[in-house]
Amino acid sequence: MISLFFKEVNSFFSSIIGYVVIAVFFLIIGLLMWVFPDFSILNYKYATLEQLFDVAPMVFLFLIPAVTMRAIAEERHQGTIEFLYTKPVTSWQIVLAKFLADWFLVAVALLPTLLFYYSVYQLGLPKGNLDSGAIAGSYLGLLCLAGAFTAIGLFASSLTTNQIVAFLLAALLAFIFYWGFDFMSRLPVFVGRVDDIVQMLGIDYHYRQISRGVIDSRNILYFASVIIAFLAATRLNLDKLRG
Amino acid sequence: MSVKVRELTKIYGTQRAVDNVSFEVQKGRILGFLGPNGAGKSTTMKMITGFVRPTAGRVFVAGIDVSEKPLLAKQKIGYLPEHNPLYLDMYVKEYLSFVAHIHRIKDVNRRVAEKIEQTGLTREQHKKIGMLSKGYRQRVGLAQALLHDPEVLILDEPTAGLDPNQLVDIRRLITEVGRQKTVILSTHIMQEVQAMCDRVIIINRGRLVADEPIEQLTAKAQGEAIIRVEFKTQVPVQKLEKLDGVKAVEAEAGHHYRIRTDGRDIREDLFRMAVQNHWVILSLAREQFSVEEVFHQLTQNANG
């Protein structure tokens, strides 16, 4: 499985994909945090990384589907999935290796944003006046959210041989899981009855909980279940190819 | 027995893609898998390799039940799928190392170098697979299948789409490695079967229609001959059938007749009969009966 993981990671960094993902993410977040006056920290005048954690999920909403879209769709299109399945590896290993590799790439894309943390830390008045605990929590939340999106993206990629379809499906599913439940909970049918439960089905709710810096096992459990559910569905989908 | 297939059946929807197929192959033998397109060759091979799950029946590779211990069985199988799927953006050496790691081969570099040499890829080893010609890609596919030194090689149309030179090279390579392994290869080129295989299995519409050594199949071919004759006028088929050695007579369009014999050349007798009856012969020819004809017959009969 380790060799499968490295093969995936290598495919990102031996092609342009890995670098583009990292650059695009850094650029968008950088522009929003420092340049565009509507969002810029320099105008906001508070030493926080709120912009990063507010905007990153939206960027992930299209960036992660772009990372995951080829993962399985391409293997199906090229027929290499048959090659993998006739090698001594299990279908869980194949799915898990792809998941971890894609998640890893997103995590690497997050790394450069630590630079922003350092900058804001330095700019604070007095220096270092920012809530590091909450920021650490937010990073963890962001990683969890990225994991959920990656699992969703892999699932979408396993549904089709067409990468564009995989991308759009992944974006749609991720959107539904991120905001969809939140919006739905405001439907008159649910309000006052089960709106809190519907809201808790969505990623946004749990992301915000973790971001506050209070790490509750229930939120972690939520992300773990979403990830496992989508990976299991992905595996099931792949197994269907075997007739 | 190196490969044992027992009553293998695969049903897709209502269609029986493979229907109750059983056969065995011994070590050191090359088995040719023949059949028209869509006959179920690939499906059978996919089931042997454990990719497609059979609806019924079992496959044993080197004594291991493929559906019971898939991982162990896969270590024993080298498989070249139809169309030879490869990661086109990987380098030859990188790809083979990756495969070696999957198989947990200990001395990866040495083994990869060895197979690169064996398959004649030395000059291409630093190229991207996507840059290679079809013949070289086929070699990469073979190198990948041979890398873990499997007992059984399953090759699904290994020579499809190659030019004559590449064809000869790949065939030589397969016969070479086939001496120590069990090889099952599918093809629809008859000469290939005659040139490489010890035994032939012909499959049609999912069913096994022939399973015999290549000599027997060619003997069968020699056991029959076809005489084609064209008369000026209609002649009674019954009279032709009375000739010695005639097995069957088919009347074709325009006073053409196709006479199947038990191998004898009846042209002279036919000529005398025609003279006696004042039939005018316009043309008379004997057809070479080949493995191709046997194949044609076996797969045609089953169709009708």
Image (cartoon, rainbow, N blue to C red):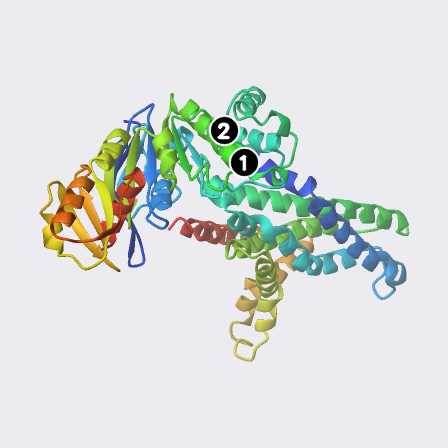
Above or below, B143 relative to A49: above
Q: Position of residue A5 (x, y in %)?
A: 58, 38
Q: What is the chain identity of the residue bearing mark 1?
A: B
- The structure residue drawn at horizontal position 62% and vertical position 46%, both measured from the top left corner, is A102
**Residue B206 screen position, x and y as percent:** 28, 48
The image position of residue A154, as x and y in percent, is 55, 52
Q: Which residue is mark 2?
A: B169
Q: Considering the numbered disc 1 on the image, is that residue within a helix, a strand or a loop?
A: helix
Residue B135, numbered circle: 1
Q: Is residue B207 visible?
A: no
Q: Residue at x 15, y 48 (%)?
A: B275
> Are dots 2 and 1 in contact, CB under 8 Å?
yes
Front residue (pair A199, B187): B187
Judge from the rendering whether residue B44 lies leftward or rightward of residue A87; answer left or right. left
Disc 2 packing (10 Å; few <14; some 14–19; many ≥20): some
Estimate the x, y position of residue B56 in percent, counting from the top left: 26, 46
Near mark 1 (Cα within 10 A), the count class, few <14, some 14-19 or many ≥20, is: many
**Which residue occupies the extreme bottom position in the image?**
A188
Amino acid type of the residue that numbered disc 1 sits on in the rendered structure? Gly
Q: Chain of mark 2?
A: B
The reply to whether residue A74 is in sight is: yes
Q: Are marks 2 and 1 on the same chain?
A: yes
Q: Taking B37 as reference, is B86 left or right?
A: right
Which residue is nearer to you in this view: A50 or B146?
Answer: B146
Identify the image quadrant of residue B177.
top left
Depicted B36 relative to depicted B198: above or below: below
Q: Nearer the viewer, residue B159 or B155?
A: B159
Which amino acid, by three-letter code, is at mark 2?
A: Asp
Q: CA distance from mark 2 to mark 1?
A: 9 Å
Lower position in the chain sequence, tag 2 or tag 1: 1
Describe the element under mark 2 as helix, strand or loop: helix
